[in-house]
Image (tube, rainbow, N blue to C red):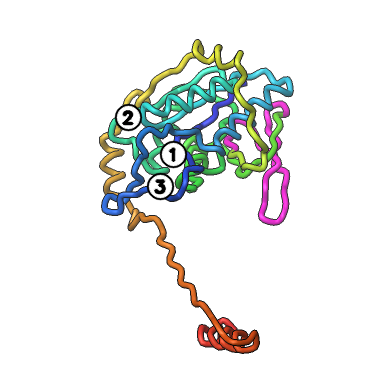
Amino acid sequence: MRILVCIKSIQNPEIAASVFRVDEARKEVIPLDGLPLVTSPFDEQAIEAALRIRDRGQECRISVISFGPASSKAAIKRALSMGADDAIQVMDTGLEQADSATTARVLAKVIQHAGPFDLILAGRQAADWDAGIVGCGIAELLHMPIVTFAYALEVTGARVVVERVLDDGTETVEAPMPCVVTISNELGEPRKATLKETMRAAKKPIEVATAESADVDSSKLRAEQEHMRARVGLYVPRKESKCDLISGATAEEIARQAISKLAASKLI
């Protein structure tokens, strides 16, 4: 059995809001110098889901794939040190800022060339843009069934049984493989890399691929992405606060002033 996990490198979502910057003219996030990228937390849980399938005795080979700049190799190394067996790093100059639809198209083509895979896992969404499109896009392009928001899954023969999260509870879904499953944070904490696996990770194979190597016309993708760019604006919300100090000789007077101000503001 072959399992593929899609991962993405992002700016650390735990950075302080005070140091987060965007270029409002270019509508882009400004990378912070000296701050390494991290693996999107939902994708780490997707890796954990794959490892749990193997822990339960299922014989499988776990691969990871990442589409992004050269710096995404750090996330691949972390995945390998967690226990993945090999990796595919997809790089293409000019597509480093690819949108979700373009990313799904490139990954789907690379997966076709590298496959077949029985199970493709991804995080429920990336923790930077929170779009949740790539996993669904891959399933659509590869004509595979997809189950989203999984918090537990088990492989039974040629099928996968998934427990998925709903707004008001959970449900159990069974799907034939090959299929795509997106993993939710309810799966639980991903494991830490062991010293043994970290040492082994240095010898695990990493294949480098490009859009062209997967028969994708990257120049056409770049043109389409520029033409279809729909980002109207990007900015850090500005928070303004105003404080009115109420004073009075007695508590009753202060209360009357407070009520008057609340009524004037139509809050009561």
Query: Label 1 crowding class (10 Å Cα cut-off): few <14, some 14-19, many 20+?
Result: some
Tag 2: residue type?
A: Asp
Does 97 appear above or below 205? below
N-terminal of the two: label 1 or label 2?
Answer: 1
Asked if residue 172 is among those painted magenta in the image, a careful observer would answer yes
Q: Could you tell me if the residues under marks 2 and 3 are in contact, i.e. CB atoms within 8 Å? A: no
Identify the main secondary structure in magenta.
strand
Q: Residue 20 placed where, x, y %?
A: 40, 47
In the picture, which quadrant includes the C terminus? Answer: bottom right
Tag 1: residue type?
A: Gln
Disc 1: which residue = 11
Could you tell whether 121 is left or right of 16 in the image?
Answer: right
Helix, strand or loop status at disc 1: loop
> Residues in magenta?
156-181
Helix, strand or loop status at disc 3: loop
Disc 2: which residue = 92
Disc 3: which residue = 20
Q: Residue 144 placed where, x, y %?
A: 55, 36
- Residue under the point 71% across and 36% down: 161
